[in-house]
Image (cartoon, coloured by chain):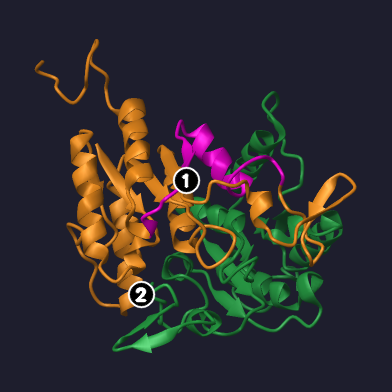
Chain colours: A green, B orange
Amino acid sequence: MRIYLAGPEVFLPDPLAVGAAKKAICVRYGLTGVFPLDTPALMPSGPPDWRRIHAANEMHIQSCDALVANLTPFRGTAADSGTVFELGYMRGLGRPVFGYTHAPADYRARVADARRLGEIWRDGEGLEVEDFGLAENLMLEGAIAASGGVLLRGQAPGGWTDLALFERCVAEVSRRILPQPNSGSRLSPSS
Amino acid sequence: MRIYLAGPEVFLPDPLAVGAAKKAICVRYGLTGVFPLDTPALMPSGPPDWRRIHAANEMHIQSCDALVANLTPFRGTAADSGTVFELGYMRGLGRPVFGYTHAPADYRARVADARRLGEIWRDGEGLEVEDFGLAENLMLEGAIAASGGVLLRGQAPGGWTDLALFERCVAEVSRRILPQPNSGSRLSPSS
């Protein structure tokens, strides 16, 4: 099974290193990780860089059976918009989506200027702040749940390259989408 | 043609008012606007609120021919994550996606701590800042362009309820996806 590895790690100084580390974890769980910066089988040619990168990533997602997104807040309260787009895209394809975030607090608690006005929480601009006990906007959480996935929360003392929570998420992917043998570990089918 | 009206206006104190105003504009361009808070033909029952809202919105998007997203930055550098998810979802369905933003500056210029290091712009954390002259992450812009849509930028002196740029975007939707008569206005087919 091929798993698309969505997340803002593509912006790290050494993105290929974290991509390789993520793929190595996938292998240990019987999965093939596909990193956004991988070269697709049929690389689109012609248009400017950003269009080619976009086209390659959509091809990658189409080629995968499920998606694991790093939904850690990125330059604001919510996850990286490119990552969120990819989560939505895979859900539009009808395939399972999973997520994890290194910000364990509820979304509402992460909006610094949220205040309760009657029944509703609102930010300093008067805009409602979702208060469902979720980590992210309900569309992301709803899609993950409806697709059979999970959104895991945890600390990451090592920052963006800390892959402990990612590994827990990959374990969930493996458990939920890989064909299960009658019993025992799916990682040792011959045992 | 049915157009899904994605955006953080659902969080305004009076979301139904702006929803009604957006739908009225759609009508003038020969389109039917579908607002996230509309009740879908078959409202899902049972699970807790956030799951029902998510399910209803996915149903709405499935029922639409195109999507117009308000991609104005929301609680950070990028667009509202729920809106971005919906944009990705519609793109995953293979249908046209359009956007507009009330922040006219390039994405890179909106990252306050972006600094140029060699060929690459990086933020204070060392993460790369996209510098393609785009308003949003390349996945969003790439999807909009590849689907035949446009992403419009403009000022909004009236804030979240200022619909001038939204109307320009709806005019683009109408021009690009409605069947065109031989000549003249598509809004007066009998003339």
Q: Circle 2: is it few (<14), some (14-19), or many (20+) Cα within 10 Å?
A: some
- The residue closer to the viewer here, B36 or A128, is A128
Amino acid residing under circle 2: Trp
- The residue closer to the viewer here, B185 or A16, is B185
* Direction right: furthest residue: B118
Q: What is the x, y in percent for residue A7? A: 67, 60
Please give left or right for residue B122 compared with residue A146 in the image.
Answer: right
Q: Quadrant of the N terminus of chain A?
A: bottom right
- Per the image, is B156 magenta? yes
- The residue closer to the viewer here, A153 or A177, is A153
Q: Which of the labelled discs sits on residue B50, or is there none? A: 2
Amino acid residing under circle 1: Gly
* Direction front: furthest residue: B157
Label 2 vs label 1, nearer the camera: 2
Q: Mark 2 lies on which chain?
A: B
- Residue position marked by numbered label 1 in the rendering: B92
Identify which residue is drawn at 22% across, 20% down: B185
* Direction left: furthest residue: B190
- Per the image, is A153 magenta? no
Identify which residue is drawn at 23% across, 43% down: B25
Identify which residue is drawn at 68% across, 77% down: A168
In magenta, the rendered stretch is B131-159
Q: What is the x, y in percent for residue A26? A: 74, 64
Describe the element under mark 1 as helix, strand or loop. Answer: helix
